[in-house]
Image (cartoon, rainbow, N blue to C red):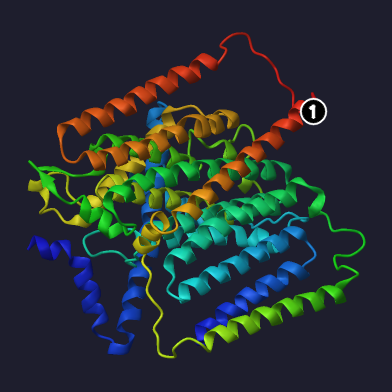
Amino acid sequence: MSFVFYILSALTVAGALAAVLLKNTVHCALALTVAFAGLALLFLDLHAQFAGFAQILVYIGAVAILVVFAILLTKGSETPKDGVFSKTWLAGLAVAAAVFAVLGWAVLQSTSRLPQDVKAPTVTVQQIGQSLVGRYVLPLEIVAVLLTAAMIGAVIIALHEKEGLQ
Amino acid sequence: MFETLDQIFVLLQHWLVGFLPLAWQSVAGVLLSVVVIIGLFPALFALTTVFERKGLGRIQNRLGPNRVGPFGFFQPVADGIKSLTKEDIVPLSADVAVHFLAPVLLVVSVFMGFAVLPMGRNMVLVDMDAGLLFYFAIGASTELSVFMAGWSSRNKYSLMGAMRAVAQMISYEVVLLLSSVTVVMIAGSLSLTKIVEAQNHYTWGLPHWYIFTPWGLAGFVMFTIAATAETNRSPFDLPEGESELVAGYHTEYSGFKFALFFLGEYLAMFSISGLGTTLFLGGWSAPFSFLTWIPSWIWFFSKLMLSIFVFIWMRGTLPRLRQDQLMNFAWKFVLPMCLLNLFVAGLWRFLGASWQRWVFCSAILILAYIGMGLGEMRRKHIGPRRYRYAE
């Protein structure tokens, strides 16, 4: 629990809070990008170089742009007339607290079973690559099929609109 | 003597840092390198603006700036004073916070990209194991700043320019990454210093640069195309096309913020030329084995300035591509060639060192290029113009 960890987690939590509390939707999307950046820096703090840089490349470089485009091209960028907070916020809070309690209990349970003086393994990119095409090749191929199906689906949806209008 | 000259900046850094107590030395060393980078590349940027305006002028049969200083070489000083003293106009309905942060984000992320480029032997700021991935991750943040600039100005021209720019940058980023992946495959590492060291060998006096291999040449051409599109340079500069969109996403920026956008664009050009040099042109290694006595950083910066010259040359020569033309080009021609290039690089590696691999790899690439080119051209109906209206 070092000083850097506190700063980075404060940044992430602030970004996430701003993403739900701000009124302008594009500001919310940009605050979410700050939360993503905070997560990536936390990965880098744990010496997981590949995970951190892949987080920046994928989330900030692609997902944030996608979110922002989606907000722009729909009417979501105008502030809704009946407020941004939902009416059933108490139930939502209870459910979120319950999920957090279960996850926290599971994580704390697992750390008490590990030997206390084990160092974190340093994983190089080469090891990740070799395990991806060695032991985990089937999940890799399934994810590739899933991505291809998603791309084809997106193209079909976009195509269909033009045919429908004509 | 030449080894000292080669390492002179490293030795200078160690000597200067030696004056400080031991605990501060590593931080001071890094800070010193950072200050040098922040000072050197904007100075190069100033020089490049003059070269560009004079070069474009000569290509277009006119003189370029020639009033300020000998042959106009103090023009950037005049430009700097102008941008510092101009009024900073922010539109009334603009989103002030995002409008302010967009150029800041651009310049910060572009400067961070310089941290992993090996500018000479032992002259990298941060020697990361995943250096190439870091560079691409930081480059992805520049797209976000372009969008922020266009959206926060509350101006339809800016927004359209920003959307076009982001679409173009996303498409060509895929091409950029895929053409770099071939280099990573053959070099076996994501670290830029190891990639340069893998190219630093000589056979019969000629270097093992990746551009001298069939897949390397194809990869370098595609990398150059993608780099031109990523930095929004002509012929891909429709987002800032002056005749269509006023100035695209930086229409509403005046004074120093516009100078920051300009700086960011040129620094992105330097940084991506540096990356192309490292990946394909051998980084800081000399072209012939009898020239290795010339310091490594001179080679790196010469190759960098040569790439900048090629960028300026392309800007003066080629007409601008229309948005749908450049998107079609990216997705229908360059991306399939990139994927084929990956396959060819794999074939190169597994055929081992023989003359057959040169013949096969070159044959596959040339046939694919001609075949896809002919196939695409047959689908274009060159005849009277048909109009399609926006819905």
* Residue marked by disc 1: A164
Left or right of B376, for residue A158: right
Q: Secondary structure at mark 1?
A: helix
Q: Residue at x 66, y 58 (%)?
A: B99
- Quadrant of res A10: bottom right
Residue under the point 63% across and 52% down: A65
Report if residue B263 is visible in the image. Answer: no
Q: Is residue A164 above or below residue B282?
A: above
Residue B21 falls in image quadrant = bottom left
Q: Nearest the camera: B350 or B137?
A: B350
Spot occupied by residue B220 in the image (x, y as percentages of width and height): 34, 39
Q: Which amino acid, by three-letter code, is at mark 1? A: Gly
Nearest the viewer among B187 and B166 is B187
Q: Nearer the viewer, residue A49 or A33?
A: A49
Residue at the image point whose x is 57% and y is 59% from the top? A60
Q: Quadrant of the C terminus of chain B?
A: top right
Vertically, is B232 above or below B97? above
For the question of whether residue B212 can be seen, the reply is yes
- Residue B292 horizontal/vertical position (percent): 11, 52
Q: Position of residue B136 (x, y in %)?
A: 45, 54
Q: Is residue B313 above or below residue B141?
A: above
Residue B213: image location, x then y, percent: 24, 37
Q: In the picture shown, does residue B127 fall above or below B339?
A: below
- Which chain does the residue under circle 1 lie in? A
- Looking at the image, the residue that sits furthest to the top is B383
Q: Quadrant of the N terminus of chain B?
A: bottom left
Mark 1 crowdedness (10 Å alpha carbons): few <14, some 14-19, many ≥20 = few
Q: Is residue B375 left or right of residue B28?
A: right
